[in-house]
């Protein structure tokens, strides 16, 4: 383990320990904001395993949030009478992850033939198709909605409980990304981002690496989706397959720094803070403000906020 | 028997309109290599402009086409020159997000100005129809198709024979070489964007006549344009027409025989099938820009 890697690991664990005390000191509103930040950070990092490391920016990762959430919901509603409460969330997570893995492994073959913006938009198509099927096939109950059993122990406030679950989820995703980043596999993904054809020519198994990164990213996204569905307690198609999620996942990386380990975390925290705390009172203005932020971001800081800091620092 | 003929003819009419709405998107992608996610918004701007002008002057909405196209041409030129040009030669993701940001802003402005309700343009012949054999044609749909075909032909002629068209095609083929021959590439980019916006606006009028529209439809028209371009091929009116007709027929066949709630599913399956069978698109150049 190099010094940089071990330092990154130590930062992650130290931050997680500090954040775990959040609910004890924060007022309830900020516990909710914290939940959303951790959820977004987890999603952002999961997206970046494919989008940041390998350069395959997906515009449709909400598909996996939805598939994970609905799979978990259906499985848990079948199990809720048989299995005791504490085991429901793990069962749902396993089912959601399995379903996302299968779906992503199958669609990887046609979808990963596309590159750049074509891949991005094709993923948007995947997310719309999944939403449409969920909404219109009665089995999934997407238009009626799906209830989740309350899994928080009765002695704990649900908001605080889910805060800790989100924290665990985000930490897991970050650990996976960290492990990938320092492995041979991670180096292969970076080489795909830099120049896929050259990497392939030099013997990097680009097709296999891309597929693996896609599946890992999808599974982690699905698991965050399962937690999200539980914290909502009741989901419909529209509450999990959201186009603004599709967009936000790109923006987190773009804001924090594309292809870095902590970039999406910083981006997610920043964006959630801006939209939930600063713009909370301006609902009519939300779309406009998000658009303006996006335009300014692309024009002024195409390398993310961290690149702005770097440029300022004299070298 | 008459049902399938009717469905097919409806699909072709719809396809002509899809083709017109996608041709600008295809042009920008072919020349600038930018995915213009604000394309759907430009289509809607055209529809709203036509609604305002035709009710204010009391003229047929088709007659507002030149006015709307001129306004959108100017808007497109300025939009590209001062905003998109800054992101053009960087990563493709940057320009995509830039146009998406503009789309969100304009959508919000439209909701403020026009309210989020459905609107429609109703010409005087809205309910007229005629029969040809067993098949019924609405006058609105036929005039919409005719307008689409005329405009597409016009664009094809413009690209093929005019000086502007030659410069645009040269820039699309080899930007650097065109620049070396004295082409002012930035100017051509802006002109291309203007032409594209003008045709998006014209498509908006035609769409507004046959379908109701609201500010929330913009993503639908952008997605449609994207699928049409992937199916048909980048940068040519002929490719857009082929892709548009295919999409129109598939959409109406799905709505008729499978169910009206699955348009995206069949569209997407078609796309996947095409990717597996012909990874370069029907006319062979759909993904050249993505390599």
Image: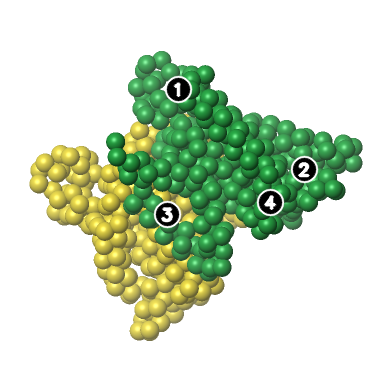
Chain colours: A green, B yellow
Lateral position of residue B168 relative to residue A104, left or right: left
Q: What residue do we see at 69% from left, 31% from top?
A: A98
From the image, tell me which residue sits under label 3: A294
Lateral position of residue A279 relative to residue A141, left or right: left
Please tell me how many numbered marks the rendered image carries: 4
**Discs 4 and 2 lie in a common subunit:** yes
**Kind of element beneath mark 2:** helix
Q: CA distance from mark 4 to mark 2?
A: 36 Å
- In the rendered image of this protein, does residue A221 appear above or below residue B123? above
Q: CA distance from mark 4 to mark 3?
A: 33 Å
Q: Position of residue A188 (x, y in %)?
A: 45, 22
Q: Position of residue B161 (x, y in %)?
A: 17, 52
Letter of the chain that mark 2 sits on in the rendering? A
First reached walking from the N terminus: tag 4 or tag 2: 4
Which residue is at the front of the view, B219 or A223?
Answer: A223
From the image, tell me which residue sits under label 2: A74
Proximity of marks 3 and 2: CB atoms separated by less than 8 Å: no
Which residue is at the front of the view, B25 or A157?
Answer: A157
From the image, tell me which residue sits under label 1: A188
**Kind of element beneath mark 3:** helix
Lateral position of residue B116 relative to residue B98, left or right: right
Residue A25, numbered label: 4
Q: CA distance from mark 1 to mark 3?
A: 30 Å
């Amino acid at each position: 383990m190099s010094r940089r890697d071990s330092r990154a690991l130590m930062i992650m664990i130290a931050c997680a320990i500090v954040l775990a005390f959040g609910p004890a000191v924060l007022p309830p509103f900020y516990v909710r904001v914290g939940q959303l930040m951790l959820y977004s950070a987890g999603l952002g990092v999961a997206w970046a395993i494919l989008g940041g490391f390998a350069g395959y920016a997906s515009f449709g990762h909400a598909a996996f949030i939805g598939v994970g959430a609905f799979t978990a919901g259906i499985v848990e509603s079948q199990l809720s009478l048989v299995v005791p409460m504490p085991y429901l969330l793990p069962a749902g997570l396993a089912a959601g992850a399995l379903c996302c893995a299968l779906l992503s492994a199958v669609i990887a073959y046609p979808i990963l033939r596309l590159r750049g913006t074509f891949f991005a938009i094709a993923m948007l198509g995947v997310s719309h198709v999944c939403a449409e099927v969920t909404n219109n096939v009665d089995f999934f109950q997407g238009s009626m909605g799906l209830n989740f059993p309350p899994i928080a122990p009765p002695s704990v406030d649900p908001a605080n409980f889910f805060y800790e679950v989100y924290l665990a989820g985000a930490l897991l995703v970050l650990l996976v990304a960290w492990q990938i980043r320092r492995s041979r596999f991670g180096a292969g993904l970076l080489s795909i981002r830099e120049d896929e054809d050259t990497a392939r020519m030099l013997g990097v198994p680009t097709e296999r690496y891309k597929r693996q990164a896609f599946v890992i990213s999808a599974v982690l996204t699905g698991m965050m989706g399962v937690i999200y569905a539980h914290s909502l307690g009741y989901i419909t198609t529209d509450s999990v397959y959201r186009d603004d999620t599709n967009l936000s996942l790109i923006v987190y990386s773009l804001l924090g720094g594309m292809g870095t380990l902590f970039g999406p975390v910083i981006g997610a925290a920043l964006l959630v803070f801006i939209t939930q705390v600063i713009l909370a009172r301006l609902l009519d203005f939300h779309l406009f403000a998000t658009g303006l932020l996006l335009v300014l971001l692309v024009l002024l800081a195409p390398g993310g906020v961290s690149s702005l800091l770097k440029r300022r620092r004299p070298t | 028997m008459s049902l399938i003929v009717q469905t097919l003819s409806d699909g072709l009419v719809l396809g002509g309109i899809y083709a017109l709405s996608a041709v600008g998107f295809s042009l920008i992608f072919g020349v600038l290599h930018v995915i213009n996610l604000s394309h759907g918004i430009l289509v809607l701007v055209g529809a709203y402009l036509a609604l305002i002008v035709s009710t204010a002057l009391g003229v047929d909405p088709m007659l507002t086409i030149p006015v709307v196209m001129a306004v959108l041409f100017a808007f497109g030129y300025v939009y590209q020159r001062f905003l998109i040009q800054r992101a053009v030669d960087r990563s493709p993701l940057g320009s995509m997000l830039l146009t998406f940001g503009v789309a969100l802003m304009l959508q919000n402005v439209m909701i403020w100005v026009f309210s989020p309700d459905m609107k429609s343009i109703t010409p005087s012949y809205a309910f007229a129809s005629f029969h040809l054999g067993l098949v019924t044609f609405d006058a609105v749909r036929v005039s919409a198709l005719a307008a689409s075909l005329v405009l597409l032909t016009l664009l094809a002629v413009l690209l093929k024979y005019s000086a502007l068209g030659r410069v645009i095609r040269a820039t699309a083929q080899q930007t650097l070489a065109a620049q070396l021959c004295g082409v002012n590439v930035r100017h051509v980019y802006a002109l291309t964007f203007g032409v594209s916006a003008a045709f998006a606006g014209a498509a908006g009028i035609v769409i507004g006549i046959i379908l109701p529209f609201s500010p929330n439809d913009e993503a639908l028209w952008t997605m449609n344009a994207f699928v049409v371009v992937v199916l048909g091929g980048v940068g040519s009116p002929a490719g857009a027409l082929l892709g548009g007709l295919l999409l129109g027929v598939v959409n109406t066949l799905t709505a008729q025989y499978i169910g009206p709630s699955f348009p995206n599913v069949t569209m997407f399956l078609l796309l996947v099938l095409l990717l597996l069978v012909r990874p370069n698109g029907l006319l062979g150049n759909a993904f050249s820009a993505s390599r």
